[in-house]
Amino acid sequence: MLNTKAEPSRRRHDDVFHDILELDKIAISVRSHKLLKQLLTENHKLEEIMQGSSNEIEALEGVRNWIMSILKNSTEALKFYKGEHEGRKIFESLKWCDYAAIRLLDYIDSAGREFEDLNLRGEVAINNPIKMIWLAVRNGVGGAKPYFFEDMIHLFRQLSGKLERKLPDKDQMEEWMARWPSGLDPHIMQLREENKKRILNIIIDCIDKGEISSRSFKFKPDMSRANKYSTALEWWDTNHFHLNFAIRSPDLLNEMLDFSLDPDTMKNLKRAEKAGIPFFINPYYLSLLHVRVPYFAIGADLAIRDYVIYSKQLIDEFGSIVAWEKEDKVEPGKPNAAGWLLPTHNNVHRRYPEVAILIPDTVGRACGGLCQSCQRMYDFQSGHLNFNLDKLQPKETWPEKLKRLMDYFENDSQLRDILITGGDALMSSDKSLKEVLEAIYQMAARKIESNKSRKDGEKYAELVRVRLGTRLPVYIPQRITDELTMILAEFKLKASKIGVKQFLVQTHFESAMEVTPEAREGILKLISAGWTVTNQHVLTTASSRRGHTAKLRQVLNEIGVLGYYTFSIKGYMENQHNFATNARAVQEQMEEKAFGILPEKHHSRIRRFPLEAEKMVENIEELLQSADLPFLSTDRNILNLPGVGKSLSFRVIGITRYGRRILEFEHDSTRSHSPIIKKMGKVVIIESKSISEYLGHLEEMGEYVSEYESIWGYSLGETEPRMPIYEYPEYDFKVTEEITNLEI
């Protein structure tokens, strides 16, 4: 995935300098020489500067003077570069060549900075791309790889105007979207029925042979094969069946997929098993994978497949994975990375003043499957998380701990939004979930009562939003029962009466292929309970293909789901396989997502959607028609930064010898943060994959890389404003400025 360090490393030891000097002496390859020659042939001014510079300082100054002469007539771009002007509006006004000029100046300003590259397990990366070009020109050394020079060629083409940005039109966009089927397409549904039949027959055989046993799911003596299959069909409609019969070994996985996995994949999966990476793939979700690639849906299931088939990179790194989330590491009695004091060691995660994540001590700590790009893979590596579901039942101390957690929330001055997650909120039993929701209701009521004795301006923020984080509508939609629907409906009715106004289920569809009849039925039940269902999509390589995310937005809209976030993948080299560069995230935002941007005149309408969530399908359809949009881009493209929160405000300030870009992020200025943000400064991320490698991966998937040509130029990002539907309701009183539970 990505690589990060809040500040440049301060390691200035003699051995580091020695390593740097050695790297500078490494001869570049024949391929690099040829690309360098192409770079200089296309840019005579650059060649003149490099050849005329006797040292790297002169080379840096020569390039700076050249670029400043280009920018002198671009007043707005110059102000953006200097940080005098910022924000979404000026970002969108920049010319294409301005991006290149600003990047080159940032390269020069950051020349010589050292960063800890956690993709390479903490090796120090020295940022100085202009020096690398100079070393290559003067002496054929510097160790820069072909991926580096490919990025440089495109950068200078962008500067000169040879690389232009040709924005797609609506017809092109619709053609891209049409490439991707959904799980509601009849041909796809038929394939999945065949998969379901095969999987059920294998399970029946395993039960008969005694290879699988379950107290809850067993056949009566002397049952015929037909009756066994009929019984198994009934089991299929229950979530406990899919948890009980989750596949936990590579051999059984391959058998379930009709032995369609190739030998290299099986070898990797056996390595994964030996390394201790857990397998937990339930039968329903497995039925969504193709065993034979159909001509009408080539590559359509790759976004699903890359979630459950572990990559070589993940297997290689498992055991050495470095935790991404700084604020998730908590020492008892000490504040987390964002400065928050927490009531227990692992039940509350927190970044922002108004939001807290609640992780109950229930089976909700587990998931319905292990996603390859899981943000908590570090916890699976340490053994903190696993799929031993029986051992995750609430302990006798849980009610007492739950009370402590509620006391913490009640006495917090700024908290107004609680996200129940895990793991997965809906992995909890109905009983456990009902208990947690009831505790939250009682806490919210007490907080309101306490506020009556506080003066205006001293009152604490009251609870206005409750969220459930879950992937079970995707992994096991059978979990969304009538009983669960009733629990959610009753909670909303009761909580609404005391002022809670927003009730959200935040799920995680990765592909339109995951939108099945079962998933649609589950989503409609949640909506019928009066809960707004939103989606948090992870932009993997497979799901980042042209039109793929747009198609997902469209299909989700049709079943009443709104986008919330589109995440860039976080982590380090363990997620390289699935990592889509942040340049692709910005490209998707500017060139595909743009077709679904809701005009401001419709904002007042969508703002009311949570108040009438039961009508979400009809309301979305009506809004799409009146605004003449193919889908609603209500999500924000962002990266979840360690210790800072979510943002896509960045500048590419460097590039490694391997062509991996170095990004410097600002925090999201559109929302409130812990005051510690003023001390933390910017966050530097070294990406785990070069643009060349990313495009090469797309090509392996059958994509035409020429359709992605503009990706090279996206070296700036600016966080989008939050859609009105996700804004917090206003209070009729003034909240105190005091911040409790904080220690800087």
Image (tube, rainbow, N blue to C red):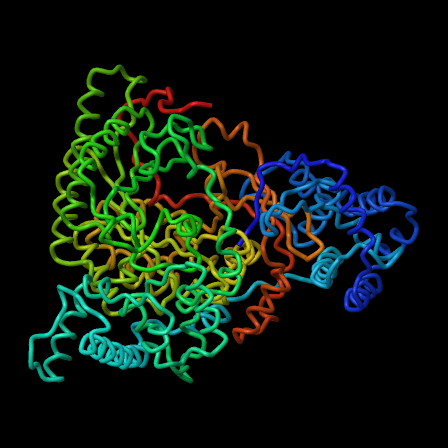
> Is 318 drawn above or below residue 124 in the view shown?
below
Point out residue 703 in the picture as x, y percentages from the top left corner.
54, 73
Q: Is residue 375 left or right of residue 735?
A: right
Q: Residue at x 55, y 39 (%)?
A: 666
> Is 729 drawn above or below residue 537 in the view shown?
above
Q: Residue at x 42, y 39 (%)?
A: 328
> Is 106 drawn above or below residue 470 in the view shown?
above
Whether residue 628 is visible to the viewer of this picture, yes or no, is: no
Point out residue 380 in the picture as x, y percentages from the top left corner.
40, 52
Point out residue 552 in the picture as x, y percentages from the top left corner.
38, 64
Whether residue 330 is visible to the viewer of this picture, yes or no, is: yes
Count the numbered circles shown: 0
Q: Is residue 102 left or right of residue 583?
A: right
The foreground one among 567 and 329 is 329
Rendered image quadrant of residue 86 = top right
Q: Residue at x 23, y 65 (%)?
A: 242
The foreground one among 31 and 205 is 205
Point out residue 566 in the picture as x, y percentages from the top left corner.
43, 54
Q: Is residue 743 left or right of residue 498?
A: right
Rendered image quadrant of residue 191 = bottom left
Rendered image quadrant of residue 182 = bottom left
